[in-house]
Amino acid sequence: MIQAFEVQDIGCIRYKGSNRVIKIKLVALGEGDQCDQLDPDLQALDQEIKADRCGLR
């Protein structure tokens, strides 16, 4: 399932589940926005990862 998120082109695949491990993996891939119920601490981590990838940190 994680691989599908890696190769999607337009962000049409969403994760609605509650498995924290899957959410962490998606955040690590930069796909945290695709989680419908992302925990606040993972939202912050997602923003940090995106900032790092954009060279903003």
Image (cartoon, rainbow, N blue to C red):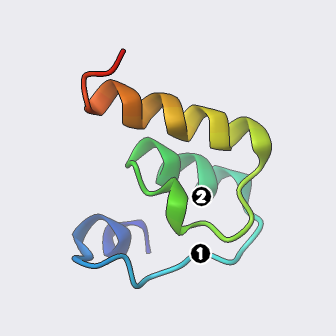
Check whether the beta carbons of the residues at disc 2 and disc 1 lie within 8 A of each other. yes
How packed mark 1 is, by other alpha carbons closer than 10 Å (few <14, some 14-19, many 20 or more), is many
Quadrant into which the N terminus falls: bottom left
Mark 2 lies on residue:
22
Q: Is residue 55 above or below residue 18?
A: above
Mark 1 lies on residue:
15
Which of 1 and 16 lies nearest the eye of the viewer? Answer: 16
Name which residue lies at 27% across and 76% down: 8
Between disc 2 and disc 1, the foreground one is: 1
Q: Quarter-wise, where is residue 16 in the image?
A: bottom right
Question: Nearer the N terminus, badge 2 or badge 1?
Answer: 1
The mark found on residue 26 in the picture is: none
How packed mark 2 is, by other alpha carbons closer than 10 Å (few <14, some 14-19, many 20 or more), is some
Instruction: Report, in whole angstroms, how far the alpha carbon at label 2 lies from the one at label 1.
Output: 9 Å
Q: Is residue 25 left or right of residue 9?
A: right
The location of residue 54, given as percent across then percent down, is 26, 32
Q: How many numbered marks does the figure carry?
A: 2
Type of the residue with mark 2: Ile
- Element under label 1? loop
Which of 46 and 21 lies nearest the eye of the viewer? Answer: 46
Q: Quarter-wise, where is residue 17 in the image?
A: bottom right
Q: Is residue 12 left or right of residue 35?
A: left
The location of residue 3, given as percent across then percent down, is 32, 68
Quadrant into which the C terminus falls: top left
Name which residue lies at 67% across and 71% down: 36
Q: Is residue 39 left or right of residue 25?
A: right
Type of the residue with mark 1: Tyr
